[in-house]
């Protein structure tokens, strides 16, 4: 039975990954900076080299699913020093662990002004320190000897999250209005957190062969299209449109499909589910 370590298992994505793969034939270890008095969680500060060394000396992990990281709390939260912790964590892991890694990166490595179909070999123009730290993590991993999957994830929603663009648009539409959304927010794509967790869980059963994968639904998405779909789902076409251009982005997910096949859910179905949950919540 494989020993699988999930970092950031107390976090938004990490929790969903853990719950998704717990029923599989894997021996799951949960890791967090804080155990929160949970005996099932290994407490380890991944920015502390000695902590990381002790962790990997104690348990022979077959796969590390690296979800832990500093993420933006707002559009203004982009301090370089804070995000350098992401690179320290990756460097520490690679210093003491030489086997398989599934790394949760971000589509933000492509930049803030991309449009159209985006392939994994696109040029990179990360526009903030968070995105730069994710790209640097990718570089560190590809230059190491560990077998890897690098997953470029879009923005995640669902799973009880009460923040983010999708949540805010639904809440405002219930009030027959729309939130203030800056037109400059061009490169935007989203995925339900449970679908992202499903992809990750499926990859634990595959040979890890040094691939970088876009993760998503493989369809054009934009703020403009999000609002249009939600207005139709919620029968809110009486709500005035806002000045947002249809600068759509479509992550090319052909590599994802080759490895794990089609997803069970679509973007529109997940949005419909989210409308029901928030409306009844």
Image: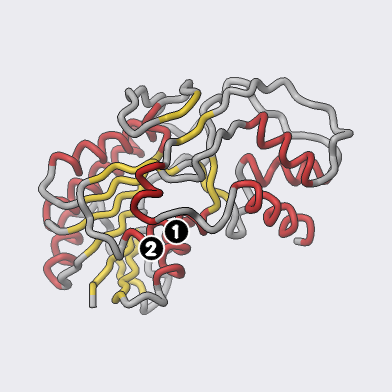
Find residue 237 and report its horizontal and vertical position in percent.
85, 35
For the view shown, which residue lies furthest in the right direction? 238
Label 1 crowd (10 A; few <14 / some 14-19 / many >=20): many
Tag of residue 16? none
Find residue 6 and report its horizontal and vertical position in percent.
33, 63
SS at mark 2 in the image:
helix
Judging from the image, the colouring scheme is: secondary structure
Left/right of residue 199 with respect to residue 222 in the rendered view: left
Alpha carbon separation for disc pair 2 and 1: 6 Å
Find residue 13 and report its horizontal and vertical position in percent.
45, 56
Q: Nearer the viewer, residue 121 or 165?
A: 121
Q: Nearer the viewer, residue 55 or 139?
A: 139
Label 2 crowd (10 A; few <14 / some 14-19 / many >=20): many
Disc 2 marks which residue? 201
> Do callouts 2 and 1 mark residues in contact (Cβ within 8 Å)?
yes
Disc 1 marks which residue? 197
Residue at x 38% of width, y 63% of height: 201
Q: Quadrant of residue 43?
A: bottom left
* 281 in relation to 151, above or below: below
Of the 4 image quadrants, the one containing the N terminus is bottom left
């Amino acid at each position: 039975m494989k020993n699988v370590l999930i970092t950031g298992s107390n976090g938004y994505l990490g929790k969903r990954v853990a719950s998704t793969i717990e029923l599989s034939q894997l021996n799951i270890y949960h890791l967090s900076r804080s155990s929160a008095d949970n005996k099932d969680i290994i407490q380890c500060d991944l920015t502390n080299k000695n902590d990381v060394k002790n962790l990997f000396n104690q348990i022979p992990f077959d796969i590390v699913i690296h979800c832990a990281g500093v993420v933006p709390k707002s559009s203004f939260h982009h301090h370089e020093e804070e995000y350098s912790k992401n690179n320290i964590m990756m460097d520490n892991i690679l210093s003491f662990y030489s086997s398989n890694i599934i790394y949760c990166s971000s589509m933000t490595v492509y930049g803030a002004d991309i449009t159209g179909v985006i392939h994994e070999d696109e040029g990179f123009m990360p526009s903030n320190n968070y995105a730069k730290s994710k790209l640097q993590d990718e570089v560190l991993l590809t230059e190491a000897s560990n077998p890897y999957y690098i997953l470029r994830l879009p923005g995640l929603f669902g799973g009880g999250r009460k923040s983010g663009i999708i949540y805010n648009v639904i809440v405002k539409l219930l009030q027959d209005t729309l939130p203030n959304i800056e037109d400059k927010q061009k490169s935007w794509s989203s995925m339900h957190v449970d679908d992202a967790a499903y992809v990750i869980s499926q990859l634990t059963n595959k040979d890890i062969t040094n691939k970088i994968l876009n993760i998503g639904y493989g369809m054009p998405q934009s703020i403009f299209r999000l609002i249009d779909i939600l207005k139709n789902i919620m029968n809110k076409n009486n709500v005035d449109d806002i000045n947002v251009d249809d600068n759509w982005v479509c992550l090319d997910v052909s590599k994802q499909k080759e490895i794990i096949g089609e997803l069970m859910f679509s973007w529109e179905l997940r949005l419909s589910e989210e409308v029901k949950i928030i409306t009844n919540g």
